[in-house]
């Protein structure tokens, strides 16, 4: 959403996961200054990468777009007062849109840069060479129906700490397509190998979510409308 500040809040359990949704509904009822759109993502108990039986450390993720930083900061304070959370300020970048609707399952992932890279270096590799490896060289667009990268520029975590994430990709993929693309497939091997060039693997948390749009400011476009894919423009920066 152009001209807005995006705040991503990764929420720890508070009694029950849906207690956070009740909290958000109450905040919306009171009014949130500068809010343009809010999506509540309930984290599902699904092990997407098939690596562990442990439940995800977060129960929900809020994506909120504000007209300015002041509105985002005020909401961030109220979230912190309600319970433990990791809050990220990000610039969203649309990478690819297949144009297929309705959208299937949504997956969100935390990324932390390698210690020997700056945030700028890691994010540049992610939005250029990594995109080229997945979408151009291995046709990941065949199963990634919609793909955004959220490039973090600030957070409420101490700089360099384990939860000071540098990015969050979000993509929509049909379970049937996902089942055909195993970890040992050429595309997934290539993506995993390239990740090691810019990502600390210990910081990866992969979550399947059920999203609910809870607020759209009148006159603002809601949902995920089909948009021209900017992939060619992205790759010009490689």
Image: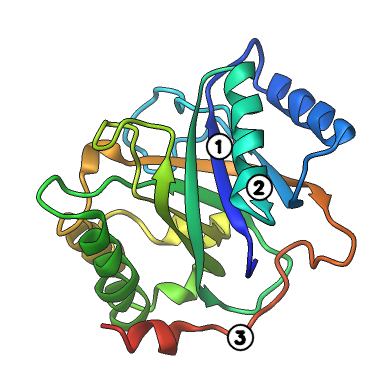
Quick one: label 2 or label 1, which is nearer the N terminus? 1
Residue occupied by mark 2: 64
Q: CA distance from mark 2 to mark 1?
A: 8 Å
Can you tell which quarter of the image residue 131 is in?
A: bottom left
Residue at point 34% right, 84% down? 235
Q: How many marks?
A: 3
Q: Residue 39 at x, y = what percent?
A: 70, 47
- Compared with residue 84, is residue 179 higher up or lower down, i.e. above or below? below
Q: Horizontal and vertical percent for residue 122?
A: 23, 59
Task: Please indicate, yes or no, whether residue 140 appears anywhere in the rendered image.
Answer: yes
For label 3, the residue is 228
Which is in the foreground here, disc 2 or disc 3?
Answer: 2
Quadrant, the N terminus = bottom right
Give above or below for 205 relative to 98.
above
Q: Are marks 1 and 3 in contact (CB under 8 Å)?
A: no
Callout 2 touching callout 1 (CB < 8 Å): yes
Query: Please, which colouring scheme is shown?
Result: rainbow
Q: Nearer the viewer, residue 35 or 39?
A: 35
Disc number placed over residue 226 in the picture, else none = none
* Cα–Cα span, label 2 and label 3: 23 Å
Q: Which residue is mark 1?
A: 9
Q: Quadrant of the C terminus?
A: bottom left
Q: Determine whether 200 is above or below 120 in the image.
A: above
The percent position of residue 196, horizontal first and vertical second, equals 16, 54
In-front residue for pair 23/56: 23
Q: Position of residue 119 (x, y in %)?
A: 25, 55
> How crowded is the residue under tag 3: few (<14 C-alpha within 10 Å), some, or many (20+)?
few
């Amino acid at each position: 959403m152009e001209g807005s500040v995006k705040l991503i809040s990764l929420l720890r359990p508070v009694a029950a996961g849906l207690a956070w949704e009740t909290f958000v509904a109450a905040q919306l009822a009171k009014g949130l200054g500068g809010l343009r759109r809010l999506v509540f993502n309930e984290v599902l108990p699904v092990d997407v990468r098939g690596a562990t039986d442990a439940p995800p450390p977060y129960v929900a993720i809020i994506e909120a777009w504000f007209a300015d930083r002041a509105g985002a900061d005020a909401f961030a304070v109220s979230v912190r007062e309600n319970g433990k959370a990791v809050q990220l300020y990000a610039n969203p970048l649309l990478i690819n849109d297949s144009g297929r609707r309705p959208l299937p399952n949504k997956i969100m992932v935390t990324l932390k840069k390698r210690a020997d890279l700056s945030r700028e270096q890691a994010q540049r590799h992610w939005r250029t060479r990594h995109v080229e490896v997945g979408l151009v060289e291995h046709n990941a667009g065949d199963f990634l129906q919609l793909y955004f990268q959220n490039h973090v520029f600030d957070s409420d975590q101490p700089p360099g700490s384990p939860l000071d994430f540098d990015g969050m990709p979000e993509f929509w993929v049909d379970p049937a397509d996902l089942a055909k693309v195993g970890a040992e497939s050429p595309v997934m091997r290539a993506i995993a190998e390239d990740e090691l060039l810019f990502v600390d693997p210990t910081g990866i948390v992969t979550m399947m979510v059920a999203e609910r749009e809870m607020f759209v400011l009148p006159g603002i476009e809601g949902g995920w409308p089909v948009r021209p894919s900017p992939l060619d423009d992205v790759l010009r920066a490689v």
